[in-house]
Amino acid sequence: LPPGTLLSRELVRTGTEVPGSRRLSLLQFNVLADGLSGNCEGKGGFTLIPPDWLDWERRWPMLLKVIRETDADIVALQEVDHVGQWVEAMEGLGYEGQVRIDTRSPCLKASLGDPATGEKFPDGVALFWRRERLSADECQHGVDGEYKSKVLTARLRCLESGAYVVAANVHLDSKKSEIGVRIRAEQSRSMLSEVSAFAQHETKPAAAVFIAGDLNATREEECHSSILQVRAERKQR
């Protein structure tokens, strides 16, 4: 495909339609931070991809096109840098949201920075919600610690029904090693603890929970199976 061409996507509904219910849609994807998309080993390592395909000015309108055409109620993104640009654009599309910046973002080491100023932009995870349908009751940015959990969790109120939903966006460690597996397991446990606290709130229990993210994991890893287990437990309630 030539640069600037989007792959076609087909969205599918999940779960069973309940008469009288109000459905919410979620879009999630890793947008590839500009600071990590360089065509060299020291800046992203995407050495087999034509540089034109990685150019931010070319990719930026394509990213917005996907979001605009999908028209999701909740948008969860990973590797978000150029934060001000994202927030302004999403507000223009009818969204409110928050971005959790990784204070130890690899972009600070890999990025060449702004051509004019040399400023480097750290990346993070972002949650946006359509303000016509949802409002934020509380957001939690996770805690930087030994395992650098990149988690953003929000309790959102549906303006149509008054019901609460919980949305979580997580970007787990990318190391492809035994250490990476252990870190991802710990990060997922921390994230699920946060989600559980939000979902089981004494006066504002969640009618639904959305967990989105880039797990960097195989289906056999604990971080993956633990999320599926929570999903199964909620279905049984």
Image (tube, helix red, strand yellow):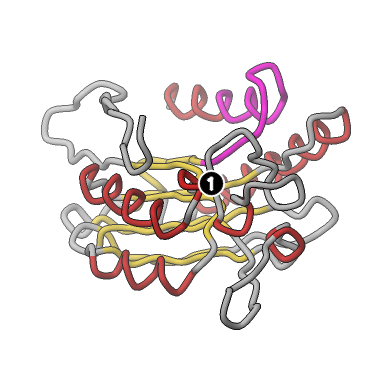
- 118 magenta-colored: no
Q: Residue at x 41, y 60 (%)?
A: 57
Quarter residue 236 falls in? top left
Where is the C terminus found, in terms of image quarters? Answer: top left
Q: Pick the residue in front: 117 or 195.
A: 117
**120 w.r.t. 56: above or below:** below
Q: Pick the residue in front: 220 or 134.
A: 220
> For the residue labelled by badge 1, is the local secondary structure a helix, a strand or a loop?
helix
**Is any part of residue 230 visible from this angle?**
yes
Q: What percent of the width, then of the height, locates residue 44?
A: 67, 47
Question: Looking at the image, which residue sits at the far right?
Answer: 179
Does 65 sit left or right of 112 as displayed? left
Q: Residue at x 32, y 55 (%)?
A: 61
Instruction: Check disc 1 and report the residue beneath it.
Output: 51
Q: What percent of the width, then of the height, locates residue 201?
A: 49, 54
Neighbour tally class for label 1: few under 14, some 14-19, many 20 plus, Cα within 10 Å: some
**137 w.r.t. 65: above or below:** below
What residue span does the magenta drawing correspond to? 213-229
Kind of residue at badge 1 = Pro
Q: Residue at x 45, y 74 (%)?
A: 84
**Is any part of residue 199 visible from this angle?**
no
